[in-house]
Image: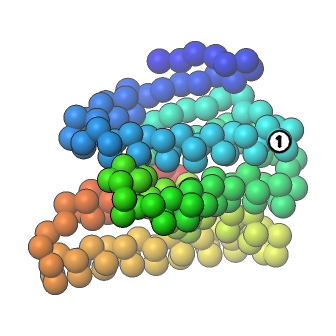
Amino acid sequence: MSFRIGKTRITIRFFFAAGMSLYMIVLPVQQALAVFLAVLLHEGTHLLLLRLCGRQPQEIVVGLFGMRMSEECFVLLDYRKELLCVLGAPCANLLCFLLLLPFAEKNDYILYSCAAHFSLAVFNLLPLRMLDGGRSLQCLLLRYVSLQKEKSIMLILEWITFGAVGLFVFFLFRNRAPNVSAVVFLVYLFFLFVFHK
């Protein structure tokens, strides 16, 4: 499904819609709403900061691996503005987490919101090229090393990250009861790593 808002073409892929529908069926309504609002804040912050920096994406694709904006909106941004646009979203999630944390014990929805904001921020700060952490690291590396070195460094960091997450999930299984969420996260991370190059 595709539509336009102003000059921006927005495409929502089938697997995103199917995944969100399944998510809404499986999770309790409060948890699903907390996750949806955390994601909405995250992606909305990216778009707001781009607009404040004078850029507007020509295309936004919402798919199984999240939202992807056309690359030309980052062209000609200096590295400070690009870092602001990329890191602003996980920082917004961390700020919400910190603001809601004192009230988390009083209300289940606030507790779910804290978990959603914190998880989304930490996940997006992983040093993978397709995530905010990797994108910001690329931006910094390219100021100091050649493109070829940057690609090598990022590939090594991606393998280390994937291996560390895999070991973490393995130890969870070994020392505790099986954690389905951890396995789903690892599988998602694997597909993100392999197919989102």
Is 112 drawn above or below residue 166 in the view shown? above
Q: Position of residue 104 (x, y in %)?
A: 41, 61
Q: Is residue 96 left or right of residue 105?
A: right
Q: Is residue 4 visible?
A: yes
Q: Position of residue 112 (x, y in %)?
A: 37, 54
Is 12 drawn above or below residue 112 in the view shown? above
Q: Position of residue 63 (x, y in %)?
A: 46, 36
Q: Number of labelled discs?
A: 1
Q: Amino acid at mark 1?
A: Leu
Is 158 drawn above or below residue 119 in the view shown? below
Residue situated in front as seen by the camera: 196 or 123? 123
Say which residue appears at 30% left-offset and 79% top-offset. Answer: 167
Q: Is residue 63 left or right of residue 23?
A: right
Say which residue appears at 66% left-offset and 45% top-offset. Answer: 45
Q: Position of residue 139 (x, y in %)?
A: 74, 63
Say which residue appears at 60% left-offset and 70% top-offset. Answer: 154
In this view, the residue farthest toward the left is 177
Colour option used: rainbow
| Image quadrant where residue 61 sits | top right
Q: Which residue is mark 1?
A: 52
Residue situated in front as seen by the camera: 50 or 105? 105
Is 95 drawn above or below residue 18 in the view shown? below
Q: Is residue 129 visible?
A: no
Say which residue appears at 41% left-offset and 71% top-offset. Answer: 162
Mark 1 is surrounded, within 10 Å at the Cα level, by few (under 14), some (14 to 19) or many (20 or more) other residues, namely: few
Under circle 1, the secondary element is helix
